[in-house]
Amino acid sequence: MPDIIQLLPDSVANQIAAGEVIQRPASVVKELVENSIDAGASSVTINIKDSGRTLIQVIDDGKGMSPTDARMSFERHATSKIREANDLFAIRTMGFRGEALASIAAVADVEVRTRIHGEELGTYIHILGSAIQKQEAAHCTEGTNFSVKNIFFNIPARRKFLKSNSSELKYIITEVQRIALANPELTIALYHNNSVVFNLPSENVRKRIVSLFSRNINQNLIPVETATSVIKISGYIGQPKYAKKALGEQFFFVNGRFMKHPFFNRAVQQAYDRVLPPETFPSYFLYFEVDPATIDINIHPTKTEIKFEDEQTAWHLIHASLREAMGKFNLMPSIDFDQGGAIDIPISPVRGTQIPEPEIKYNPNFNPFEEDRGRGRDFAGATSYRDNQNLDNWQQLYKGFERDGESQNENPVFQPANFDEVEREPVQQTFIDEEITITENHNFLQFKNKYILTPVKSGLMVIDQRRAHERILFENFLRIIDNHLAISQRQLFPSKLELNAADKEILIVLYEELKALGFEIRQGEGDDFFVEGIPALLSSFNASDLVEKLIGDFKRRPVDVKEEIKEHLAMLLSQSSAINYGVSLKPEEISDLFNNLFACRTPNYSPSGKTVVSIVPFQDFEKMLK
């Protein structure tokens, strides 16, 4: 039998290995900027074209490289950071594997110009797909200038599966944010297609956070400072009332390196227990300093996953540190001794005074089966105050239920869809056997301000009020987009949006679709945007909150195919603007919700595929009561 195992050619092996380190253009940015930091750079400039597909250029003022070092840096496992295995337990630098430049050179067209400080000439090297094309002396500035062109040019499948330009740029911005937060003393600038995305001077941690995430975050930050023999914790956390419904401002750093750590994230979440609004995420920017020998950063090629020697102790210290920080700012729940008014404590009687025995009054003639038992009760000759109060104030039970009265809200919580402008779609035949009719005479009960109950032919119908509203809004938004029927409600006072660079790019991508829905957004100076109009259907909602939530939802579930954006945007918008659980609805609002739901094509499922309507069979009630 002939031998079948052979060594792969270096070019193939390098391409395979590159897939572990270089996943997308953002990976190239991360590796090159980290090398600049290790080289002692105080200033880094990043130039991007076409979200990194065409060009990624990183220029620094670090110490530069000699001709030999410049050439050796592209060899796999060639590094200046470690010499022996024990060095792995004392790593303070960002890179140490010696794989980054070799991986980049294997999948791109790379040019490097570098000069050591004090030298007259530098070095120029051109590498194409791991093959050296040219190396010569050259005039260049002190430091290093890397240019990476046409990433994945020799791996068409990898290049084909890159996401849209907006998504790839978002990943690059995220990587730059992480590096900028970990190194606030570093001057860093990011340009995309010759437009400024970031231009950050050297500053302290708090100012760096504000520069990256808008001025509004400054009032939100709570300082954290704890020093122990196990771990030193510093940084900032956000106040609970400013927590957002979208992720994006959660950062851990250990010894100047960004890391992901779900276990420590739970420590943060539990520290906010009972003070955080539901379905929200607090901001945190936490910096840990530990002995390098107590962590292992060599468990993943991208070095973002780090193993701690004593995670349990670190978890408890993080949790306690955050609780202490919130306690200093009076953000933790406390006992309010003033609630309910003063407590009447009787004065101690004089010694020898006889204390009268308490009397119990009852009506021996009380008959609970009398039809008129609720009226005229007389307990030992006294009329019940509670009964009189109920009789006098029974009209208050119906306050706010008038259809045409003055007490009716001008802007009801639920606004029915405007079906006069579009043709009503046929009801789906899922519940055809139930003889559901679009009428105002249905009997409804709102249960726990979450479900709507109504009897039908075969039992009891249960409707999830939020999911029902999502389905109605979703189909209505789709009709508006398809038929260009959007009506914008102008805002008397435009709402201001202060967006960071990543959110700004997302808003630019969504702008045309938002405009088709009735949003009117104008860009001011810098990253400030003004919402001057929103869809008339959503006129009762806060304009800026609605747009910010929409951007947050889009960040969590981005869509790259242009054709899918309309449906995806309609779904996100319906979820962002649907009524919440816990909202009490008026009878006419429940009736409108019911009628509009069963005028939808798919009334039994929400836009995300969750069940909206369920029927409890009549037989189940009989079984429960046997």
Image: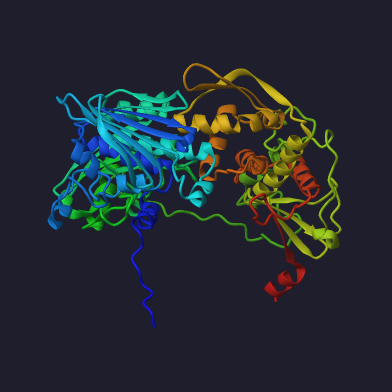
Image spot of residue 200 (x, y percent) = 34, 24
- Residue 185 placement: quadrant: top left
Image spot of residue 511 (x, y percent) = 61, 29
Camera-nearest residue between 58 and 574: 58
Image spot of residue 491 (x, y percent) = 64, 20
- Residue 553 placement: quadrant: top right
Q: Which residue: 25% across, 56% down?
A: 311
Image spot of residue 65 (x, y percent) = 20, 35
> Can you say whether 130 is above or below 177 in the image?
below
Q: Is residue 398 visible?
A: no
Quadrant holding the C terminus: bottom right
> Can you say whether 197 is above or below 596 in the image?
above
* Residue 258 horizontal side relative to residue 507, left or right: left
Q: Which residue: 65% across, 55% down?
A: 609
Number of callouts: 0
> Can you say whether 49 is above or below 4 in the image?
above
Camera-nearest residue between 341 and 605: 605
Quadrant holding the N terminus: bottom left
Protein image colouring:
rainbow
View extreme (bottom): residue: 1
- Residue 89 placement: quadrant: bottom left
> Can you say whether 492 is above or below 382 in the image?
above
* Residue 82 horizontal side relative to residue 340, left or right: left
* Residue 606 horizontal side relative to residue 599, left or right: left
* Residue 359 horizontal side relative to residue 3, left or right: right
Q: Is residue 137 visible?
A: yes
Camera-nearest residue between 203 and 454: 203
